[in-house]
Image: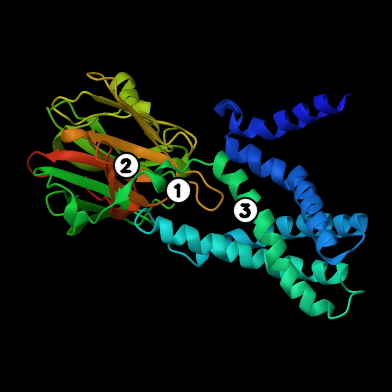
Amino acid sequence: MKRPSRFFLALAIFWFPLTASANAGTPLMWASMLHLIFGNMVLGVIEGLLLAWAFKLSKWKSIAILIVSNYASAWCGRLIATDDLLGLQDLSIQNLWSGFLVLVALAFCLTLLLEFPFFWFALRSRERALRRALKATPVVHAISYTMLFAWYWLASGTSMLTQLEPVSVQEIPSMEGHSLYYLSTEGDRVFRIDLNDPDARKVIIPVVAPDQNDRLFVHSNGDAAFDLYLLLESQGARKSLLLGSFAGKVALEPRIAERGIEGARNTGGNFGTVPSLAAASDWKFQTGFWALEGISGWNTRNNQRMHYSLEMPFVSWPVRNATCLDGGFLIFQLGDDQICWMHPETRKVALLARGKGPVVSQANGSPTAPAGNGV
């Protein structure tokens, strides 16, 4: 194969993650895989050449040592560091920028720590090898890490980080007459928030719903009102009635509207067409399975389009259980336990609560709990 052909083949292989079909995963998944399998070799070659040039070492020995170094640090970091790093940060949409920068810095420091012995080994025959290795390790990695950062940034979904403005709940418009029901993060209680006062929340009923995909949903009871149910994905999509006639108006999910209560089966990861509580809205919204698909919308009047998502090496938060309200406002679950409010047109977002499986309703009378409830 001629050299130009090899070049374009290599370029196509490394560009593929940026254009891969969602049916085969996401670009970030491909970028991570190629980095772990092939990218460490490329980084080892670059770092080895830099080290050999700076300290007049053998190119081949430097390259060989630093290829091993990159594979060792990448796989060790992958196996032991991700959860530990994330555990240092209570990340949410409110502190995402600062938390992300801290995680990048921690990952860089961890890489230096893991790869320093290999730099020392490559320089061991030189005078003051320890001092030279202490200097060479951060300088060489500042160059290679910039390349690696660009590689992952291009393959990531970053619009929630770069395009949305986090605001406090006190800054969001009052939504008189609307209530938000959701499960606690641990799945042991159902809470209610009146959206005209998002700071106040009330425990409605105790439950046992520990699975990540356990959630709340609603169904018509045939009396011009709706009942609130608990869907337990962890128990074979078991459905339990929590509150009868708890609302006069809800955004009924399309699957449940078409198929009745059985439409809730296997919808714990609730995505797709976003149901609307709005009296009239030009906006239509859709959520996707992958975090990269996030939430997208289009305005049927002026054809305006929007798309926000977050899928990065440290954080990958899909959008679930979304509802559209009057004014083009959205309430949805972000990641495992963030209940968020968003106004796409003004690009503002707020963290309403930590929990899962949200349902938004307009009140109608007093809800009733089934006898013996406490699921």
Task: Answer with the quarter of the image where residue 60 lies.
Answer: bottom right
Give percent across and percent down for residue 46: 78, 51
Residue 320 at what x, y percent from top left? 38, 39
Question: For numbered disc 1, what is the local secondary structure?
Answer: loop
Q: Quadrant of residue 80?
A: bottom right
Q: Would residue 231 be seen by someone viewing this image from the given angle?
A: yes
The residue drawn where x is 45% and y is 49% is 211
Q: Which residue is mark 1?
A: 212
The residues tagged by marks 1 and 2 sit, at their Cα atoms, a distance apart of 15 Å
Colouring: rainbow
Question: What is the spatial separation of the Cα atoms under label 3 and label 1, in whole angstroms?
Answer: 35 Å
Place residue 24 in its image quadrant: top right
Q: Is residue 78 visible?
A: no
Q: Residues within 10 Å of mark 1 (few under 14, many from 20)?
A: some
* Residue on which disc 3 sits: 146
Specify the quadrant that holds the N terminus. Answer: top right
The mark that comes first in sequence, 1 or 2, is 1
Q: Residue at x 53, y 61 (%)?
A: 103
Q: Label for residue 332?
A: 2
User: Of 199 and 109, which appears nearest the observer?
Assistant: 109
Circle nearer the N terminus (3, 2): 3
Disc on the earlier residue, 3 or 1:
3
Q: Do callouts 3 and 2 mark residues in contact (Cβ within 8 Å)? A: no
> Secondary structure under badge 2?
strand
Q: How many marks?
A: 3
65 with respect to 319 (left or right): right
Amino acid type shown at disc 2: Phe
Amino acid identity at mark 3: Thr
What is the spatial separation of the Cα atoms under label 3 and label 2, in whole angstroms?
Answer: 34 Å
Q: Nearer the viewer, mark 3 or mark 1?
A: 3
Looking at numbered disc 1 in the image, what kind of residue is underneath it?
A: Gln
Q: Is residue 249 above or below residue 349?
A: above
